[in-house]
Image (cartoon, coloured by chain):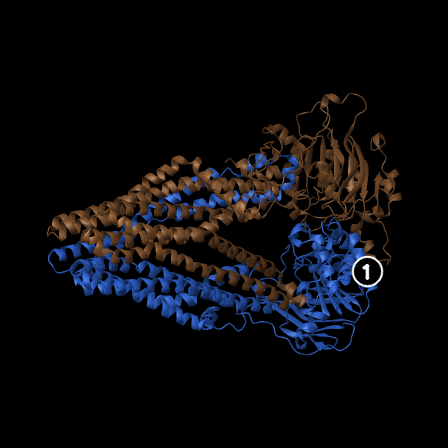
Amino acid sequence: MSLTAPRSYGSGRFPTPRGEGPPGVLHGGALLRAATRHSGVRCVTLGLLTTAATAASLLLPAALGRTLDVLLTDPSRATRWVLYCTALVLALAVLDACETVLGATTNARATAWLRERLTGHVLGVGPRAAGRFRPGELVARLVGNAAQAGTAPAGLAGVLAALAAPVGAVVALWLINPWLALVFLGGAPVVAAVLRAFTINSSECVARYQDAQGRIAGALSEAIGGARTIAAGGTADKEVARILRPLPELSREGHRMWRVQGRAAAQAVAVAPLLQIAVLATAGLLIAQHRLSIGELLAASRYAVLATGVGILVGRLGGLVEARASGRRLGAMLDEPAATYGKRHLPPGQGRLELCEVTVRRAGRTVLDGVDLVVPGGTTLAVVGRSGTGKSLLAAVAGRLADPDSGEVLLDGVPLRELDRRELRRAIGYAFERPALLGDTIEDTIGFGHPPPPPDRIRAAARTARADDFVHRLPRGFATPCAEAPLSGGESQRLGLARAFARGGRLLILDDALSSLDTVTEHRVTEALFRHTPGGSRLVVAHRASTAARADTVAWLDGGRVRAVGRHAELWEVAEYRRVFGGGAAPYEGDAPPGGEQSGGSR
Amino acid sequence: MSSSDLLDDRRSGSEAPRAERSVSPASDRRSGVHRRGLRFLWARRSVVVRLAAWSVLETGQTFLTGYALARALDAGFLAGRVGVGLGWLGAAAVAVVVGAYGTGRVYGAVAALVEPLRDRLVRNVVERGVRDADRGALSRLTQQVEIARDTFAGLVMVSRSFVFTAAGALIGLFSLAPLLVLVVAPPLFAGLALFALTLRPLTRRQEAFLVADEDLAAQLGAVCPALRDITAAGAEEQVAADVSARIAAEQRAARSLARWGVLRVVSLAIGGQLPIVLLLATAPWLLAHGVTPGALVGALAYVTQSLLPALQNLIHGLGTSGSRLAVVLRRLTPDAPAPATAPIRNSAPPSAVAHSAPPPAVALSSVTFAYGPSSEPVIEGLDLLIPHGTHLAIVGPSGIGKSTLTALMAGLLEPTRGSIDVRPVPGHPATPTRVLIPQEAYVFTGTLAENLGHLRPAPVPEAELLAAAEAVGLTALLDRLGGPTASVDPGALSAGERQLIALTRAYLAHAPLALLDEATCHLDPEAEDRAERAFARRSGTLVVVAHRVSSALRADRVLVMDGRRTAYGSHGELLERSPLYRDLVGTWQPAGKAPADRLPGTSQPALALRDADGVDAVAGPGLPRDRRHVVAYGPVGQMKAPGDLRHGGALGGE
């Protein structure tokens, strides 16, 4: 799917509404608790399973040792003990299998629940969510963090068992012979201290590795941007060689990372076996003094291994901590409340739009300041003004993509807030400077929305937007998958226009949606739109004088206020108005800035 | 396997056909990855041997785990000889330390396997990225290559560890009492066999899960930047339903994978835990056949401490990292040949060009071009002869096919029908025939001299470089940056400054045909004038996709492209003849006496021919074959008025 990033309204972040307490903390905890409750039965079952499995694994060494002793002393009585052991091993396997399946499905279930819930919320919040989090950030949270947080319920269920195993093993060692537990407990800190002393900081070579990788990626990114130059110049080989210049360094740092890791691993793998050998030596001495049986030695060696499983516990706790952190990040997404809609429907009308005393603040700045504006039904109002005067925000407020902090917006006499959501969206169509296009094919893209318009209307809309020419030249015309048709800025803008036209509605809002069209095409589109489609009104944010000239009325916005409303020809007498369009300063007439560096700016 | 195995590099002429080139189903591709993996290892035999050598230390440690314990019991503690017992355990402790040292060194050997693979993947990704102009190459470079690196290393560690641990344990069992091997080995191998059997379905499910996960991420990646548009279209439910379907699909895949996880547990139970039970059950018989109590304890230690954990690691490691690696490697080294750019055809060697009338620099005959077999052509039946030394301007509305035409002339695209000949200049056979400067100027991080000499085989002498900079108008920037040896940060330059660098580079290429595809659109009119005149002064032919009407005024000839007709002539002729040209030049009066047209700026209007965003995806290299990059542009259409385009010397030759 080919997409261009939308522009967020206004500048900066939205202030946190009614923000008591650190954002996200409350919601994060509540969210994870709710996810756990959602899988409550599974979690309890999982907890029981893991506890049972831990109990079985703690019983097994004792049973093994006892069996061995019986086998060595009185083989005739051994059958019973062998059966006990068999039952324990079997139980362990069955419990392990159940735990594997239940744990993984619980994770999947909780993750899906979180994703479902949060996606619904994000869609409900709408553009404001994009104002608060960058789109990539939202995706990262919904994909990565949700998966991490989804492990919390199962992790919580297993943490008790993970704690019970090493503690139980040490207790078992104590029960066999206190000396065994003492040697283990005495040795553990020594080994841990040695380990910590040798912990090697690998972050330095990781940083250098990433730096080299970053340089390759940077050069590659530049080269991809200049692909036409490279292909035309036949310099691909030369470029590849140049881009790969940091490769030897990358390789060197990569080798160094493995060596550092190897040293750390070498110490880590030695710890548990050495502790175990210490316990075995103690047990051997006790055997020589006839204070321990050979079966008890076997059991002790197994318990020593189980007791070193503290690492597993640490890992689990670490996982839980991470899951909690992820839950907090997810909870922050719930801070922004979803938009609410009324139930009212529109009376018959031609799309008369009224803005009454509309004030909007963003990041502590008043962007729109008491704007009063009327678009009579069936007419076109152009909104012009220098960049940063709140034109796009005005367009957003006019169709309820954002709500004003004070004031009211009415469509055919009905406040937008009180309108039913479907009624509202059916009545108002939007086209943007950089439309984000969704849909599998070009046809889906134009017909995007609910309910989808019929095919002939889609074709007609494409014609009006002058998009049909280039669509016909695509490999499969309207059925071309969007993934196979990367679009230029002008082409996606025309598809965005077609999408708005196909939906119809009594108010059409064009937020700088003609900026990437050449003047001839723009003229043809506006001609068709302004003159030949009666029955609705239009609000057009414009940067070109020619667009403003074709509108019935022009609202000149300056510093968040309406400076003047009138016909373009009248306003043109004012020198400052002329300067809005770049006056004579720009080398060419009201053309949008190239490269899209200035979004929403007039020159 | 050399890197050319993975890349079909036609341009450099290495046409070596590959066995796996034919379109192959997934299973073949899977085995392709395996085969290549084996070849990769075979080429690094010495590293594999080194890896094995260090791993043998771990085998020794494993061996002593049970053997030393058995001896310590039998000959030591049970016999009342504490010293002997402690001695054996001491030996085991030494073996642990030695084995740990071996583990450390194993990492070095693993690095010698993994890093070359990473190098190769990076090289491969970069080569494909540069040739296909595919932005996806960046995530492949920073993410997928790293996943491949980590999973491959994990895989090598885990499988190696299992082989050497199992060997140590089995040798140990055999040394304690050969009968023990009889009891332990059969279930171990049965468990392994079961695991091997389930590996393929398991991998398939793991892949299905990864695919579902990526699908979901891709869907969310499309939805999250589109929230404004979704709200505006009232499509919240529709999108929520789409996302839900993908969330549910991912959950289904995860569940299915989890259920297959049971088979892993079964394999582990058979291979690792059944031997414990069997050892106990056969203990009376074993003890009766000369197995000592110590040996029995040792055997149990082998099974519980060595074999079980090693098997566990193997089963979990192979199951997840293995399939991840397979998936990622398949993505990184596709079997389909990378799309190659059209071969550059230079007809007629210089000697064939006589001293008679100069031949046309570019000759297009009946050129038709369409982006797909069933799509409408962008250019149809175009005949055009451009004599040497002509300065031609191309004008037309955006999306009409101007960039496509320059891409055809530059050899970036191949015509669907018809032919394009670009002839080298007599006496300059070695230089490149043509140079294209697109709108998006390519400047890379490096020195200014490197950037300017990009199209030249050898470094450019400084005097020539400075002269070119002066001619094109780069001197001010050059001085500001600190001369030719100064390093350039493309991000810190303005779009216009980048264009100046690209123009100077093209100027230095000395190509007889220069194609400027809106290459001056970010320059102010004076700078544009200077640069274009510099190119026009050269001896070669100049084709300019005009950005301002002044470009058309400067040219000898103008080609007007429109959906319905193509007109060709001088500026003055076209003003009379072509209504579209008049429109584009901005002298038409729109039907509504709009005062905007009295704007002071209109005396020098932009043709506004380009898409203002500069997001012109057309004609990346490799386009003809890569459907993902298809961008349609308007057709030039049939030549309705062939008289507009006169052939031969009549054109621009006067």
Total label count? 1
Q: Is residue A182 visible?
A: no
Q: Residues within 10 Å of mark 1 (few under 14, many from 20)?
A: some
Location of residue A559 (image quadrant): bottom right
B504 lies above or below A388:
above
B120 lies above or below A365:
above
Where is residue A404? Give x, y as percent.
64, 71
* Residue toward you, A281 or B603: A281
B182 sits to left or right of B262: left
A19 sits to left or right of A305: right
Residue at which label 1 appears: A528
**Mark 1: which amino acid?**
Ala
Where is residue A567? Give x, y as percent.
81, 64
Under circle 1, the secondary element is: helix
Tag 1 subunit: A
Location of residue B559 (image quadrant): top right
The blue one among the chains is A
Q: Residue at x 81, y 70 (%)?
A: A535
Where is residue B79? Give x, y as percent.
11, 51
Where is residue B225? Give x, y as percent.
60, 60
State the hue of chain B. Answer: brown
A448 sits to left or right of A221: right
A376 lies above or below B557:
below
Specify the quadrant that holds the C terminus of chain A.
bottom right
Q: Is residue A236 visible?
A: yes
